[in-house]
Image: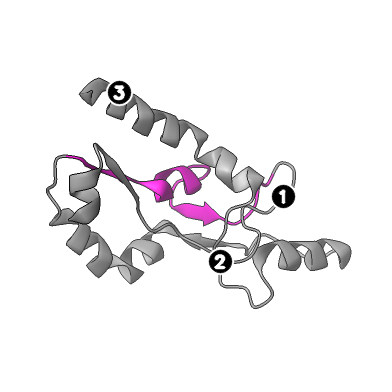
Amino acid sequence: KVFRNASRFVVLDEFYPYPTTSAGMATSMHKRLLRHQSTTDLKATYESFRIKHANYFARLDLIHIRNVIRHNTSAALCAEEKGWCWWYNRDNLHSYFTDNLHLSADGLELLRDSYTNVLKDVIKQL
């Protein structure tokens, strides 16, 4: 409530799918590439993410505050192949995560258009 009253708009970045490797995604990618191991399993289904966090999204659906903008971050992170969330860029083999939660430069690049659209929505409402 404090943020709502003190801000014209609040952007709520929703949960996004993330890897669960023990060493962190960038380190895991690096080790696999050095050992010439496959990286094709470094992904998860979008459906498993939605099921895991169903209660979270159900609670978000109950929020109806005019100046809160929900930002669907998972859409951009899972857009490369329908139904799958990849943990790395398959063109250049760069990890989308520095560890298991924080996005790398490549990961943030996936969200550029999404954030641009959020800003456009804010400007329309001014």
Give me the disc on residue 123: 3
Q: What residue type is labelled 3?
A: Ile
Pick whichever, 44 or 71, lies toward us: 71
Pinpoint residue 67: horizontal percent, then vertical percent.
19, 40
Q: What residue type is labelled 2?
A: Pro
Q: Is residue 123 magenta?
A: no
Left or right placement of residue 53 versus residue 81 in this view:
left
Where disc 2 sits, the SS reads loop
Mark 3 to mark 1: distance in Å?
33 Å
Report crowding for label 3: few under 14, some 14 to 19, many 20 or more residues within 10 A (C-alpha): few
Image: magenta residue range: 67-90
Q: In which quarter of the image is residue 32?
A: bottom right
Pinpoint residue 96: horizontal percent, then vertical percent.
62, 52
Pick whichever, 2 or 126, lies toward us: 2
Between discs 2 and 3, the one toward the N terminus: 2
115 to 44, vertically: above or below: above
The residue carrying mark 1 is: 94
The residue carrying mark 2 is: 19
Which residue shows up at 29% across the image and 28% down it? Answer: 121
Q: Does the magenta stretch include residue 84?
A: yes
Q: In which quarter of the image is residue 122?
A: top left
Where disc 3 sits, the SS reads helix
Q: Which amino acid does label 1 sit on?
A: His
Mark 2 to mark 3: distance in Å?
34 Å
Left or right placement of residue 5 versus residue 42 in this view:
left
Report crowding for label 1: few under 14, some 14 to 19, many 20 or more residues within 10 A (C-alpha): some
Pinpoint residue 97: horizontal percent, then vertical percent.
62, 57
